[in-house]
Amino acid sequence: MIELQNIHKIYPNGSHALKGVSLTINKGEFLAIIGLSGSGKSTLLRCINRLHQPTSGRIFFNGRDVTDISGAELRNYRRQIGMIFQHFNLIKRRTALDNVLAGHLGSMPIWQSLTGRFSEEIRREALHNLEIVGVADKANQRADALSGGQQQRVAIARSLMQKPEILLADEPVASLDPATSHSVMQYLEHINKKLNSTVVCNLHFLSLVRQYATRAIALRDGEKVFDGSPADITDSWFRTIYGEDAREVEIR
């Protein structure tokens, strides 16, 4: 579904964030990306959806080279990719429903999106997506009145408005407590298994990776150092990925 070929990303300050990363993401899998902070995880996601332009290398989506597309082609490509962020990126003063409806704006003609008017069909779809993630009863509450876990679920519902073929989640539970983390991960698992969206998720906690992911890759200093089953991440691999002094912390 997604193929990355020898991706390098060098920022203007000289930081070499990705160093020749090659990767194939298969349709229908739940792929976890792990590694220390600064290892290149977020940069990798942003290269996939072209928020960042790779310095070199190629990106293919369903067999088509999307490395250098721009304008309407790039907008159409991004509509097929949902994005969930660590800090939710909601409009705090708008209701949960309004935030979810915003996920449909990219699929509307510009003149219609400027009015912010949505059909009853689209509003029903937004309410249904809130129901999928268990917060339909919060539809008319302001985003800033919701808990962190509820806000992240609204963000997931917003991404579902795009009907994404692939869903990218950048540390979606990093700001949440352990119990809420599992709740959010369960909804991502539901989207993967029941709605047939491919999920690519940056995570810190191996316990979550082992429970929810079907495959894991690890980055260290911008290079891919592991690609395989989460069950194969032994203590030895853990030290290779995180360093000799690292200790695993579990979310139960």
Image (cartoon, grey):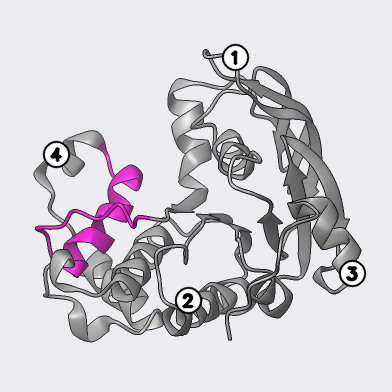
Mark sitting earlier along the chain (1/2): 1
Q: Is residue 140 above or below residue 122?
A: below
Q: Position of residue 112 (x, y in %)?
A: 18, 42
Q: Is 35 situated left or right of 159 in this image?
A: right
Instruction: Name the kind of residue labelled 4 in the image.
Output: Leu
Secondary structure under tag 3 reads: helix
> Which residue matches tag 4?
114
Residue drawn 44% across and 33% down? 75
Instruction: Name the kind of residue labelled 1 in the image.
Output: Gly
Q: Are marks 1 and 2 in contact (CB under 8 Å)?
A: no
Q: Is residue 68 above or below residue 106?
A: above
Instruction: Name the kind of residue labelled 2 in the image.
Output: Ser
Q: Position of residue 251 (x, y in %)?
A: 58, 79
> Which residue matches tag 1?
14
> Which residue matches tag 2?
181
Residue 130 lies in what quarter of the image? bottom left
Instruction: Name the kind of residue labelled 3 in the image.
Output: Asp
Residue drawn 68% across and 55% down? 34
Q: Residues within 10 Å of mark 4 (few under 14, many from 20)?
A: few
